[in-house]
Image (cartoon, grey):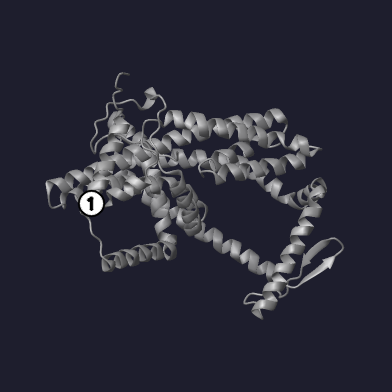
Amino acid sequence: MPPETEPTPSSSYEQIQQQRAIEVMRHSRIDTRTACLLLLSVLAVFYTLYFASAIILPMILALVVNLLLSTPMRFLHTRLHLPKPLAALCLILCVFGIAGAVGTAISVPATGWLERAPEALNTLRDRLAFLRGPFQLLTSASDRIRNFMTIAGGHLDHPAPAMETAGEHVVVVTSGPGGLDRFSSSILLGTQAFMGQFFTMILMLFFLLAQGDSLLRRFVEIMPTFADKRRTVQIAYQIERNVSLYLATITIINSLVGLVNMAQCWLLGLPNALLWGVLAFLLNYIPIIGPMMGIIIYFLVGLFVYPSVWQALLPPAIYLCIHLTEGETITPMVLARRFTLNPVLVMASLMFWDWLWGIFGAFLSVPLLAVFKIICDHVEFLTPIGHIVGGPTRTAPQNPLFTEEAAPDADSDETLGPD
């Protein structure tokens, strides 16, 4: 008989969570009225998040950045004995100062690439001339489908703009004076809205770093029973520890991905290697879709720089190899033996938050799903949902960076991240 293997802490935790979920499902009975009220409440919350995004999104971003900066904030306050307001101010100036310096360094080459956009489009059209035939087939098929829908429906609710053909190209004819003025005013309004939200986030982040602990303490004090106080503290502790550890780990990994991509761009002779390295760093925060966009961008830049299509395939191929090495080897190894998130729900969360809040929602999708799982694991009637959100348990060897004695209870440590 083979010797019995001792269950790992993570597998024991998953087994206990599974048993709790089964018990809750066994004793819970939800009638139609309760289900309808719950559905309406969820829809009302999403409605509020969508229409109040101008004030809610900066606060959520401030909460997530606060989790990322909680460890250095604690170091400055407890080890260096800096007052909390001064430590918070130093952290904000340091982090956003570095981000501003990098943004300033890449703004000039980014502006140059935008100014060369017409020339780049002509170059790409010449390099991709062999795809003109398939594109024309797709265009003709689209026109036939549109004509069929027009005849079947009698009329279109939103008619397409009038088009004229000039040679082989399609020119969209727009009418109405003041198009450029409307475009400029929309950019101005968008910039003003962004700066207002950015200022709101910075202000909220400062007060969270300086006085967030006192807010949590007051919240715990009003809990009616000791069990409720303990559960609240556990949820707050695990959200801070696990999400901050996940964000810090992913930030370090993404920084290495950006540095390696910057090095490969420099070695391959791509201009503005810093710009493409920073782009790879930012896109790696968005699961699946971010690296796919990076591969496409690297290919288009390669088409503009190199004389042949085959040479242009080299930078995106190396980018893909770097991403596969990071996504399939390094990240799972570093985040092993801690709970994972179901990859299907990670993708669904990414698409939902991207639709709701745009690019910032895509950045926040994984942390928000992780926070949701932690809350579900500690609220009894939500335990089945937390078990569904969790991904399959990994069997990779435990990394010393995250090794700690974990007991199979609510205080056991967990990891975040897509499987």
**Closer to us: 108 or 316:** 316
Numbered disc total: 1
Q: Position of residue 404 (x, y in %)?
A: 30, 26
Check the image and name the residue furthest to the bottom.
154
**Image quadrant in which you'd find residue 180:** bottom right
Q: Position of residue 122 (x, y in %)?
A: 80, 51
Question: As displayed, is residue 59 above or below residue 109?
Answer: below
Q: Is residue 324 left or right of residue 94?
A: right
Check the image and name the residue furthest to the left.
225
Q: Which residue shows up at 39% across the image and 48% down it? A: 369
Question: As displayed, is residue 44 above or below residue 76?
Answer: below
Answer whether residue 208 is visible to the viewer in this image. Answer: no
Answer whether residue 285 is visible to the viewer in this image. Answer: yes
Q: Is residue 149 left or right of residue 171?
A: left
| Amino acid found under the numbered disc labelled 1 | Arg
Q: Position of residue 336 (x, y in %)?
A: 40, 30
Q: Position of residue 171 (x, y in %)?
A: 79, 65
Location of the C terminus (image quadrant): top left
Check the image and name the residue furthest to the right.
167
Q: Is residue 84 left or right of residue 169?
A: left
**Closer to us: 336 or 33:** 33
Near mark 1 (Cα within 10 A), the count class, few <14, some 14-19 or many ≥20, is: few
**Image quadrant in which you'd find residue 290:** top right
Q: Which residue shows up at 82% across the image and 48% down it? A: 130
Numbered disc 1: secondary structure? helix
Residue labelled with disc 1: 26
Location of the N terminus (image quadrant): top left
